[in-house]
Every structure is written in structure tokens, then in C-alpha cells.
Amino acid sequence: MKFFHLSDLHIGKQLHQYNLKEDQEHILCEIVDYAKKLHPNAIVIAGDVYDKTIPSAEAVGIFDTFLTELAGIEPAIPILIIGGNHDSAQRLDYASGLLSHQNIYIAGQAPSTEEEYLKKITLEDEYGEVDFYLLPFLKPGYVRKVFGGETPESYSQAVEKILSRENVNMQKRNVVVSHQFYTGNGEVPEVCESEGCSVGGIDNVDIQPLLQFEYAALGHLHSAQRVGVDYIRYCGTPLKYSVSEWKHKKQLHVITLKEKGEPIEVETYPLHPKRDVKKFRGNLQELLSTVPEEVKDDFVSITLTDEIEPYRPKEQLEKVFSHILEVRMDNTRTRQKLETFQEEIRLAEPIEIFAEFFQQIQGRALNQSEHQVLEQILENMEEE
């Protein structure tokens, strides 16, 4: 069973002020070409199809074209899609019943009543059946009615309880498709500035309930990586969606399941963006004269090291670079300023910081009673 593992298309996203329509169409077209060439048994999209819960007409059109082109490949390739935290479950689920007749299976939202279960898609190859369990992004509150109105205590418990209801047949090969922030086996996942998640946060989900599957196709993190074991993986985004991803090597992940009990096979194929994301550092004249011609239309983050700040540096850089994301200064003056700013933050006590915040918001100082309450809260926090 060979299938593409995709996630986090984020269709409709902008990179700083730039519209990525052409870039996304370009990369999705390359994925379609790979599908025609490799003809997998299935294509899995593990959430965050769109960048916003209410996608623009332009974004919907891009995804519609992508699905239409994939659906036109003969023989037909089943497409399995789940909702991510950026998607609207209801909008993604629209016409899912009709689309299933075209081998496009969509699970926009997790079960919300006791009668509902995960959407399970069964495919078959020369070794027998493979069950794909589609687990969209969820929060504990989303599934409370599944458990008689009792909200799971954590994200981990919510995922564990939802999966335990499925009575997964361990005699078969099973794949789970999920969009959460998974951690496990003491490994710290790599996160990017555009993801908004943190290790140790309340949204962490332990990988334990995923260990029963032959493969876990994950979405949510933008960097391709394994989590704890080789068969639990994030495939990452097909494009770089922040400056923090500039070193990433974006690839198409192709997963092959063999007989039950045999290890999975992971193959990667290069993806070639219309415009890359790059970082440059140096003084202004160096950058204007030495940057290669082939990168001048890429998205660039520039750090200038001139000790004397140049005259209108961005205007000069725009004569060479067509897609500037940001221009930063890093010299003796800016480093001293930053050190002073950080020192001021280190010297401030928490109670002083909150008092200043309270003054700005309420237009008055904390009274004695409020000050005592705050002191008690801070003491309790220190004890914890």
C-alpha cells in the first residue's frame, strides 16, 4: 500500500504582505505530476487545507482545481482528507457525501455524539485490507457529548478515549490520520514561528494511543519529522510559510506499507517552489553586488551589519530584490540597545510589571486590597 502523506497546505496564506496564489498553484501542480507518475494507492491530507476558517473564493478555487486534477487521474486514486485547526469543520465537510462517490473522503470534524465514530476508509492491496482512521483536529470540549457530557481532562485523554472507542482490528494493517501537537519518548518536536504551539503546553498529545497503528500520518507541524518512533511522522508543509523555515528542505513523503509486521518504507521526492525563502546577512554594498542573480526573485529576509546605518536601505535593496520580507539591522548600536532592553526586563519584578499593566488598562493604581491579592497569587505560583 503506497500513499502520499501531505498536510498543512494552508491555501490562501500570505507570506508577510505577499499573496502566495501563484506559489501554491505551482507546488500543487508538481504534486499532481508526481501522482500521475508514481500513481499511489491513496493520497492523504492531514489537515489545514486552508489557512483560514473562512477561506477566500480564490483559496477555494485553488483547492478545487487541485482536487479536480487528482480526481481525473486514471485509474482513480482515493483521496483522504481531515480538518485541521485552521479549517472550518462544517465548510470542509460540505458535500462530503457526494464527494465520497468520487473517491474523495473528507472528515471535517471529530465525533460529537455517542452515536458517531471516526470515519474509517478501507483500501486493499496485494497483502489485504488497510483501514485508514480519519481523526480531525479536536479539543476536549468538542467531544464531551461523546462521553455523556463529561469533558476529557486533557487533549491527550480526549484523543486516547476517541481512539479507544474504535476497537481497532489488530489483525489488519491500520493507519491513523491526525492533526494535533504530538510529543513522546522524551523527544522535543521542532516547531516554527508560524505554528503557535509550545512543548509542555496544554495542547500536547502523547503518542501512546498511536503506537497500535502501522503508521500515523500527522499534520500541524511545519517541519518534517518523526515523533518518538519511525512510523509516527509529520510530513511538514509543501512550501515555506515563515522565515524560520528557510533552512527546511520541503519534500513529498511517500509511505509504503508491506505485509503486517514489516517496517514501513518512507521515500521522499524533492519539491521545487516557484520562489524560495532565504536569509542574507552582510553590509549593504556586499549584498547589492554579490547576491546571485537566480535568487533575486525569492522571498528574502535581510540583516544589515553596517555600523553606520545606510540611507534608505530598503529602497536600495528593492532595486535588487523583488520580494523583501523584512530588513533588520544588527550592529554595535542595536545590540547595545537590545541588551539594555533585556536588562530592564530582567530587573523588573512580576508584581511591578502587572501594576504597570493595571495602571495602563484601568487608569488607576492597584489599591491595597488588590495588591495583597496579587501578592498571594504570586506566592501560590512560587509554591507550585
Image: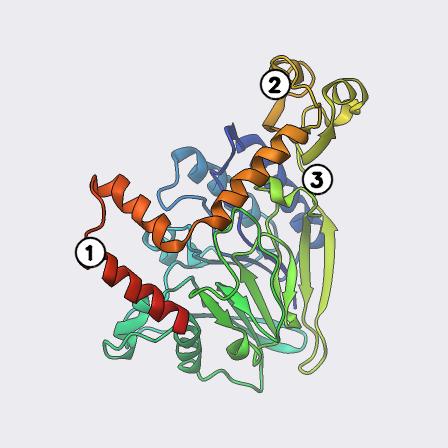
Q: Which element is circle 2 on? A: helix
- Residue 55 image point, x, y percent: 39, 40
For mark 3, what is the residue? 272
Task: Give the Cα distance between marks 2 and 3.
Answer: 28 Å
Q: Nearer the viewer, residue 328 or 119?
A: 328
**Visible residue check, residue 74:** yes
**Visible residue check, residue 94:** no
Q: At label 2, which amino acid type do we have?
A: Lys
In the rendered image, the vertical position of residue 359 relative to residue 99, given as above or below:
above
- Residue 80 image point, x, y percent: 51, 60
Q: Nearer the viewer, residue 322 or 42?
A: 322
Q: At label 3, which amino acid type do we have?
A: His
Please state which of the two labelled residues, at mark 2 or mark 3, is closer to the viewer: 2
Of labels 2 and 3, earlier in sequence is 3
Q: Residues within 10 Å of mark 1 (few under 14, many from 20)?
A: few
Quadrant of the drawing holding the N terminus: bottom right
The number of numbered badges drawn on the structure is 3
For this view, does 150 lie left or right of residue 272? left
Of labels 2 and 1, earlier in sequence is 2
- Residue 16 image point, x, y percent: 52, 32
Please state which of the two labelled residues, at mark 1 or mark 3, is closer to the viewer: 1
For mark 2, what is the residue? 314
In the picture, the disc for residue 130 is none
Q: Which residue occupies 57% across, 64% down?
A: 217
For mark 1, what is the residue? 368
In the rendered image, the vertical position of residue 307 relative to residue 105, given as above or below:
above
Q: Which element is circle 1 on? A: helix
Q: Which element is circle 3 on? A: loop
In the rendered image, the vertical position of residue 326 relative to residue 126, given as above or below:
above
